[in-house]
Image (cartoon, rainbow, N blue to C red):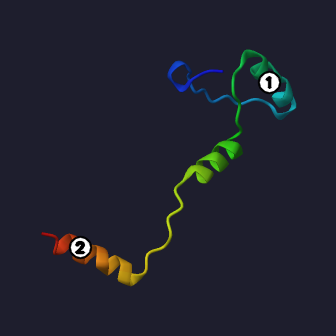
Amino acid sequence: MLSGATSQGVYLSVPIADWNLFTELARKFGWQTQTNEQLLDNFIAGRPKVEDLSEEDIMDEIRAVRYAK
């Protein structure tokens, strides 16, 4: 398997009819393939889950920074 330090990301436009052939070839070489949709889904899944802050939480943060000693 390739590590991030020794690989180069490449964007290719492959006809849908040839996608299965291309992914099979890539698998034989040990390469990884992703569609735009898979790339976006992985990015969204990897985002931190931040809960919304209440107005009181925001004011507490402001007071902590403003009046910190």
Work out whether residue 16 or residue 34 is closer to the camera in this orientation and state it. Answer: 34
| Up/down of 2 relative to 62, above or below | above
Give coordinates of residue 55: x percent, y percent. 38, 83
Q: Are marks 1 and 2 in contact (CB under 8 Å)?
A: no
Where's the C terminus, which quadrant? bottom left
Badge 1: how crowded within 10 Å, few (<14), some, or many (20+)? some
Looking at the image, which residue is at 21% across and 70% down?
65
- Type of amino acid under label 2: Ala
Give coordinates of residue 68: x percent, y percent. 16, 70
- The number of callouts visible is 2
Q: Element type at marker 2?
A: helix
Q: Which residue is mark 2?
A: 64
Q: Which residue is mark 1?
A: 22
Q: Element type at marker 1?
A: helix
Give coordinates of residue 39: x percent, y percent. 65, 42
Looking at the image, which residue is at 18% across and 73% down?
66
Work out whether residue 11 or residue 3 is closer to the camera in this orientation and state it. Answer: 3
